[in-house]
């Protein structure tokens, strides 16, 4: 049994995920964590006497070994580490929704203070790819930015959605670190510098990522899932009803391999084997865990695992010695093994008895009503499932439909569908009332995103009066583009927007792809090249046309740029295309984007004007206050009153100004996100190298504020005409 | 002294009922004892432990489900004869397994509880109690509510026969012959009785009881009255008590109290100088503890607590340390034993797996033929659906002998499903189209591996009634599921009590018409929980109830052709009126409904609600302030500048937050009940005041008792 080697109780709250250990003076490890009211506290148990006496830092009134750092803004991310290798000690990095501060705790000075328009939701510190100096990489609204120790912006790229988690990991085993980005659109993307080398789709927002060793890394989702990936393959995952607040890799049982340590929202901390996900150690806090970090906090040469709860409780664990390997829990392994084996035996015995009972039942008389009650059904009962498209009626919108039916007079009592990402929770239940029971059920399914989903079905089959039911378990895959219905080509008024590209594939293969990714009626047969197929979106009625010419040229007509991107990416993976250059035109979308870009400029100028106004007003306040106080000293109450009235009005103006400013800021953020997304979408229309070229070129165009070039790049894929 | 017990699993038998495992008396002090256990397959098994291996002494053939197992024998000799109750039959075995008795009692119901004393046999089925002496019928009693356990004070010490019945209606009935001598009210439905210290304490009259809501108490049964000695409230909200034993496990010369609960908790209480029980040890075993006894099984010289669990595990919690300190050689030997056990288990498993595979194939083949049938394997589900008095919510406990895969919860009434901390299952709520399919709640619980027990918490609304269904699917092949139904009654938050305050202003509802006593009783059963399904004996019956949420009361008295319901809460009367008239119409019975409304009762109910509401409002306000105050504290460094009230909040912050968390949506529920009260008051006057409800809610937002009462009066 592993016990904590130290326990501290600090009287400061700790914000979740914002904990870091650093040697801010080069020798003594200190714990820094974000706390309430826009403050960061630094717990320094080693040098008690040292006092900070500067503007930013002040001594905590509650504890002698804690100092507080005033950020005056809600902290959104925090980390510590070596930013400037020449300095020889760690810097503290604090991100907020508008700024990034790199802070030298020892000298009590700012290393840099940068405004970041996209906000900083996540931060990671380290070297990336071939960039020699360590970077502080922040992830904001669709954007990634890396700063060196002088605050120079050395790395900038965009990603699909708001970033929630970052990690550095040697993903492809080349000895250089790649950047893992977990974002709001459920994707984990891997950036080799600014090139995306891999993309993994998860089922919820990725809240945490951590490198384990080699190409292995752990992840956590907002629905309570944690797991481990090796490159693009998932090793294992588990789901809990609680949420993983923080994950960290640490070798707790001294076997030379890191375990995945997870801190949960219910206060539990557990260590799971990286290979199997088996729990090898657990402990409990009285409140949610805020962060899991490591450091030599006792300064005795041994690295401890340090877990912090939101209430300020901190526990340190030393890794178990080699003798107690695999034996960190208090119950003995053998006992558990015996229990497990006995349970298995019991299950097998039960199963055996079930078959015996079954054989007995078979010998008795033919099927009758009483049998139905006990849940006896004909042994040849089969379950049929079919996926189709229902164009909907007045009462119900169009949807994909799953039809389940039994092969005889048995009824379906209920259907449970476990699938991730397409229902509110992880499951959907259909339970008809007792009067509506029948041998077939139609279940409408409307996946909100175009992703392939595995539907795990559990169907309860029996008779009307049964109290026991047979459970039929089967899995069906819902094709990626199930929300598109085939329509006849001529009826569709073809959308103006298109993408155009050439692939060297036979028409049969293209048709196979179509069959696998769309819900086509069964009688659709292969047409000869050239052919075209048209679909209508069940979500918004938008048209989609796919045309294939003899030359292998494929044209996709749709107004939905995301859909076009999805189709190209899906084709690319199906046909194993590495590089694909595409010609695209989305007049409507580009026009909108143009407007957004104009708006961004406007917001920027409004922002500057408002800031100037605010500065003016604050000067005015100062003078008013002085004058009012003068009047008071002169006992000129009337003037004093007037001055204070003016001050009051001015204050009101300031408050209003603030509201306008913050509105302006949100709008600006929204627009910036739209721009970032546009670049990302333009990239998704291409595959491989052309994709990265487009993203890089678009970025340059935006930097140089050359809107026309930007659109040309988006259309043809390169800047040069 | 710290009590440190190590768990050792001995053996698994079939599913066991309450009180079906005993230890045979030891031949000498601290020698190893044999264990006898009876299971649902009807098998009685006696085994001892030899070098860590279970050695069977005897094992009977399967038969009817064994409900109880007791030891007996001639008084003042070692009690080593084994008696089991299965169906309506009692069987006796010697300690070698020879059957010497088979006694068919001819009871119409199967036996639920049994006590043996010399040649006296005390039996009880669901409602019937019977006393036999030398298998000859002596006394008989028909109880008003279900009998959960029966015991008799030690005859050799009190020199008279005093049987005590534990009845579901929260009463212990002390009998004399065939008559009730007196009744004792206990704080919850008693589930188990045991003699204090195993012999009735100093006087021989001390009786321990445990209730299904987890309370524990000691009562002295004197010839004329009962004396309550102590009671342990269930503060930690643990499970109901299933078994009690007295044994000196601590080793201080005083027998300790061993308790097993239905949430898998095993507890040891020892007694302090004032003879008050103090919790010394607890450990959880993850499934219901059906029997418990102190003794010595695993190794002589080491005392232990032996328990049997629902799924049939016989487990020891022993004082023997796992790793001996004597030397490395010893430890090795223990490991060797373990290894042997494991390897033998593994080979057994392999064999079984092969057999199962064969059978599976056969089963698959049979599905090809058109004549064959496929039966669903039956598995037993141990379920409990009870009302918690403390937070006026229901808890549903489901326990299966093997691991649960998933549970589907479906309800045709609006109810709230609350989160239970102990659960590790992932819950997911599904959308439901209520109009066509009568679904108000559809939720799935996907259980983690090795979950055999699931606990759910449900909050119901009075007046809304229907059925809650749970589809339980365990992880056994072939996959099947079993459905369990639970009624949510119209007055779901009421609980039986035995005393009410007669001075309260009461509203009365009187029913007259052509209906029988049994019919009216069935309606009462339909409306209210905790009423026995069988119509009680006699011509006229009175039941008292208490609303667990508001503490209002209900008195129901009825006989053939007439029923009178009195309550100080107008809403209760209104619900009863609606439901009863609907039920009567369904059966085409003409009902005359008379009601008498007491205006003062509304004010009285509001006054009852007032302290609860005020407390909740204040609590909510305080909890809201905590974070801001803490921030101030961090900023200023001390709290001297705060007014005492705020300082007090800061000091109690943790406690307040805990309290607040414990009662989610309490305020909303109170608001709902006040609104119902308001609507019901005017419904009886024949006016519809639904339009005024927003106004009422506005008043509640800025709560003031007088304003509220004035509003009720004025509207």
Image: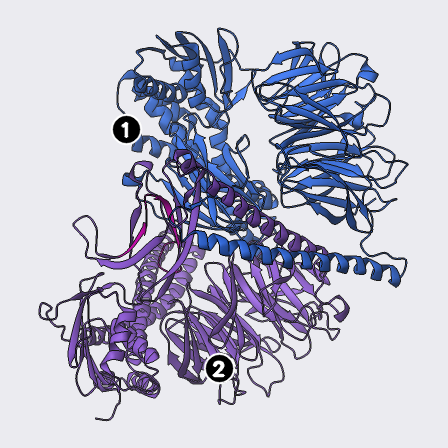
Chain colours: A purple, B blue
Front tag of 2 and 1: 2
Within the image, what quadrant is residue B675 found in? top left
The subunit letter for the residue under badge 1 reads B
Q: Is residue A265 visible?
A: no
A414 in magenta: yes
Q: Give the answer, above or below, for where B183 lies relative to A244.
A: above
**Quarter that holds the C terminus of chain A:** bottom left
**Quarter that holds the N terminus of chain A:** bottom right
The front one of B211 and B619 is B211
Q: Is residue A231 visible?
A: yes
Tell me, for residue A178, which label it has, or none: 2
Percent coordinates x, y for residue A374 in the rendering = 45, 37
Quickly name the residue at label 1. B690
Percent coordinates x, y for residue A667 in the rendering = 29, 66
Q: Give the answer, above or below, for where A28 lies relative to A659.
A: below
The front one of B561 and B99 is B99
B100 in magenta: no
Instruction: Identify the residue shown where x is 89% and y is 61%.
Output: B327
Highlighted magenta segment, given as a residue range: A401-424
Within the image, what quadrant is residue B278 found in? top right
Instruction: Identify the residue shown where x is 34% and y is 20%.
Output: B583
Tell me, for residue A545, which label it has, or none: none
On the rendered structure, is A132 left or right of A712? right
Q: Is mark 2 in CB contact (under 8 Å) with mark 1?
A: no
Q: Tell me the SS state at disc 2.
A: strand
Q: Give the answer, above or below, for where B549 lies relative to B481.
A: above
Q: For marks 2 and 1, give the CA distance.
A: 64 Å
The subunit letter for the residue under badge 2 reads A
Percent coordinates x, y for residue A59 in the rendering = 62, 64
Q: Tell me the SS state at disc 1.
A: helix
């Amino acid at each position: 049994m592993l016990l904590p080697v130290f326990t501290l109780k600090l009287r400061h709250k700790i914000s979740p995920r914002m904990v870091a250990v650093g040697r801010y003076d080069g020798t003594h490890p200190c714990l820094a964590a974000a706390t309430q009211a826009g403050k960061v506290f630094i717990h320094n148990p080693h040098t008690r006497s040292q006092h900070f006496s500067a503007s930013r830092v002040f001594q905590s009134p509650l504890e002698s070994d804690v100092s507080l750092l005033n950020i005056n803004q809600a902290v959104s991310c925090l980390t510590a580490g070596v930013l400037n290798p020449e300095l020889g000690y760690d810097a503290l990095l604090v991100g907020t929704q508008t700024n990034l501060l790199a802070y030298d705790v020892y000298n009590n000075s700012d290393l840099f203070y940068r405004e970041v328009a996209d906000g900083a939701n996540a931060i990671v510190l380290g070297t990336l790819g071939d960039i020699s100096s360590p970077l502080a990489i922040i992830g904001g609204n669709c954007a990634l930015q890396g700063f060196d120790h002088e605050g120079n912006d050395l790395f900038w790229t965009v990603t699909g959605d708001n970033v929630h988690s970052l990690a550095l990991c040697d993903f492809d085993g080349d000895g250089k670190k790649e950047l893992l980005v977990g974002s709001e659109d459920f994707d984990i993307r891997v950036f080799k510098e600014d090139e995306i080398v891999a993309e993994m789709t998860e089922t919820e927002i990725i809240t945490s990522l951590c490198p384990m060793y080699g190409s292995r890394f752990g992840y956590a989702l907002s629905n309570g899932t944690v797991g481990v990936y090796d490159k693009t393959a998932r090793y294992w995952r588990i789901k809990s009803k609680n949420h993983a607040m923080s994950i960290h890799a640490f070798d707790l049982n001294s076997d030379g391999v890191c375990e995945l340590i997870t801190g949960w929202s219910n206060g539990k901390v557990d260590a799971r084997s990286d290979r199997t996900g088996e729990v090898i150690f657990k402990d409990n806090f009285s409140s949610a865990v805020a962060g899991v970090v490591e450091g030599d906090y006792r300064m005795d040469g041994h690295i401890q695992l340090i877990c912090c709860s939101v209430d300020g409780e901190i526990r340190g664990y030393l890794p178990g010695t080699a003798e107690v390997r695999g034996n960190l829990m208090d119950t003995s392994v053998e006992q558990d093994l015996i229990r497990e084996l006995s349970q298995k035996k019991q299950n097998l015995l039960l199963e055996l008895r079930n078959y015996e009972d079954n054989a007995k039942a078979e010998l008795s008389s033919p099927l009758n009503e009483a049998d139905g009650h006990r849940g006896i059904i004909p042994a040849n009962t089969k379950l049929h499932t079919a996926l189709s498209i229902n164009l909907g009626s007045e009462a119900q919108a169009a949807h994909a439909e799953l039809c389940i039916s039994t092969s005889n007079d048995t009824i379906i009592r209920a259907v449970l569908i476990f699938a991730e990402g397409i229902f509110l929770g992880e499951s959907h239940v259909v339970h008809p009332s007792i009067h509506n029971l029948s041998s077939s059920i139609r279940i409408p399914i409307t996946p909100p995103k175009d992703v392939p989903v595995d539907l795990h079905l559990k169907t309860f089959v029996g008779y009307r009066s049964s109290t026991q039911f047979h459970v039929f378990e089967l899995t069906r895959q819902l094709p990626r583009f199930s929300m598109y219905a085939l329509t006849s080509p001529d009826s569709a008024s073809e959308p103006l927007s298109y993408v155009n590209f050439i692939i060297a594939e036979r028409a049969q293969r293209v048709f196979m792809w179509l069959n696998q990714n769309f819900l086509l009626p069964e009688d659709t047969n292969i047409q000869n090249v050239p052919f075209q197929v048209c679909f209508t979106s069940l979500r918004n009625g938008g048209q989609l046309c796919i045309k294939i010419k003899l030359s292998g040229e494929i044209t996709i007509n749709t107004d939905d740029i995301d859909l076009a991107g999805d189709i190209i990416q899906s084709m690319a993976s199906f046909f194993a295309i590495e590089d694909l250059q595409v010609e695209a035109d989305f007049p409507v979308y580009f026009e909108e984007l143009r407007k957004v870009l104009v708006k961004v400029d406007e917001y920027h100028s409004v922002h500057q004007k408002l800031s100037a106004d605010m500065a003016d007003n604050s000067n005015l306040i100062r003078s008013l206050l002085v004058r009012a106080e003068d009047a008071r000293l002169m006992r000129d109450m009337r003037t004093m009153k007037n001055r204070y009235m003016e001050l009051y009005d001015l204050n009101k103006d300031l408050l209003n100004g603030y509201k306008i400013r913050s509105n302006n800021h949100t709008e600006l953020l929204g627009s910036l996100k739209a721009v970032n997304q546009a670049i990302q979408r333009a990239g998704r229309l291409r595959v491989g190298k052309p994709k990265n070229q487009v993203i890089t070129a678009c970025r340059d165009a935006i930097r140089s504020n050359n809107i026309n070039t930007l659109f040309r790049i988006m259309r043809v894929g390169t800047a040069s005409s | 002294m710290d009590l440190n017990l190590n768990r050792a699993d001995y053996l698994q038998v079939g599913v066991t009922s309450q009180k079906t495992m005993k230890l045979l008396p030891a031949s000498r002090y601290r020698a190893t004892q044999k264990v006898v256990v009876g299971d649902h397959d009807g098998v009685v098994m006696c085994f001892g432990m030899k070098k860590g291996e279970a050695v069977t002494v005897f094992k009977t053939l399967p038969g009817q489900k064994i409900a109880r197992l007791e030891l007996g024998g001639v008084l003042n000799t070692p009690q080593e004869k084994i008696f089991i109750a299965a169906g309506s039959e009692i069987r006796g075995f010697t300690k070698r397994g020879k059957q010497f008795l088979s006694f068919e009692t001819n009871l119409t119901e199967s036996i639920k509880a049994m006590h043996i004393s010399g040649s006296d046999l005390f039996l009880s089925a669901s409602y019937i109690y019977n006393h036999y002496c030398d298998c000859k019928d002596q006394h008989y009693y028909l109880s008003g509510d279900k009998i959960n356990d029966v015991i008799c004070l030690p005859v050799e010490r009190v020199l008279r026969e005093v049987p005590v019945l534990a009845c579901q209606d929260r009463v212990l009935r002390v009998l004399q012959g065939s008559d009730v001598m007196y009744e004792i009210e206990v704080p919850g439905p008693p589930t188990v009785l045991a003699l204090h210290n195993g012999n009735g304490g100093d006087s021989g009259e001390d009786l321990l009881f445990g209730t299904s809501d987890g309370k524990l108490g000691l009562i002295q049964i004197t010839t004329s009255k009962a004396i309550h000695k102590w009671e342990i409230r269930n503060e930690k909200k643990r499970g109901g008590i299933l078994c009690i034993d007295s044994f000196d496990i601590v080793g201080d010369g005083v027998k300790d109290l061993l308790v097993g609960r239905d949430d898998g908790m095993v507890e040891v209480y020892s007694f302090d100088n004032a003879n008050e029980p103090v919790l010394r040890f607890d450990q959880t075993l993850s499934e219901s503890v059906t029997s418990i006894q102190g003794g010595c099984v695993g190794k002589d010289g080491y005392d232990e607590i032996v328990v049997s669990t629902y799924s049939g595990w016989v487990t020891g919690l022993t004082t023997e340390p796992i790793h001996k300190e004597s030397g490395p050689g010893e430890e090795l030997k223990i490991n060797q034993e373990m290894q042997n056990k494991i390897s033998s288990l593994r080979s057994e498993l392999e064999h079984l797996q092969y057999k199962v595979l064969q059978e599976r194939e056969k089963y698959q083949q049979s599905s090809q033929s058109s004549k064959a049938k496929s039966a669903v394997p039956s598995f037993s589900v141990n379920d409990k659906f009870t009302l918690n008095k403390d937070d006026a919510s229901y808890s549903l406990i489901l326990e299966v002998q093997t691991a649960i895969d998933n549970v589907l919860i479906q309800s045709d009434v609006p109810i709230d499903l609350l989160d239970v901390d102990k659960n590790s299952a992932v819950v997911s709520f599904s959308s439901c189209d209520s109009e066509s399919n009568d679904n108000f709640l559809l939720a799935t619980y996907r259980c983690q591996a090795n979950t055999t027990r699931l606990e759910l918490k449900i909050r119901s609304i009075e007046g809304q009634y229907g059925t809650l269904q749970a589809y339980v699917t365990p992880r056994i092949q072939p996959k099947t599921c079993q459905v369990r139904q639970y009624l949510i009654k119209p007055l779901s938050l009421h609980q039986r009590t035995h005393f009410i305050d007669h001075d309260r202003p009461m509203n009365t509802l009187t029913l007259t018409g052509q209906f029988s006593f049994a019919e009216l009783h069935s309606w009462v059963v339909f409306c209210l929980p905790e009423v026995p399904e069988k119509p009680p004996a006699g011509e006229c019956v009175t039941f008292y109830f208490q609303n667990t949420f508001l503490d209002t009361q209900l008195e129901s008295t009825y006989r053939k052709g007439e029923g009178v319901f009195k309550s100080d809460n107008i809403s209760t009367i209104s619900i009863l009126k609606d439901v009863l008239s609907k039920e009567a119409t369904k059966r085409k019975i003409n009902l005359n409904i008379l009601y008498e409304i007491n205006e003062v009762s509304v004010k009285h109910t509001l006054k009852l609600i007032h302290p609860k509401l005020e407390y909740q409002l204040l609590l909510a306000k305080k909890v809201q302030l905590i974070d801001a105050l803490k921030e101030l504290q961090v900023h200023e460094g001390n709290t001297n500048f705060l007014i005492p009230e705020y300082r007090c909040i800061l000091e109690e912050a943790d406690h307040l937050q805990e309290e607040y968390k414990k009662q989610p949506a309490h305020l909303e529920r109170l608001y709902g009940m006040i609104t119902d009260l308001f609507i019901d008051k005017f419904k009886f006057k024949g006016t519809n005041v639904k339009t005024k409800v927003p106004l009422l809610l506005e008043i509640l937002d800025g709560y003031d008792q007088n304003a509220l009462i004035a509003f009720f009066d004025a509207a």
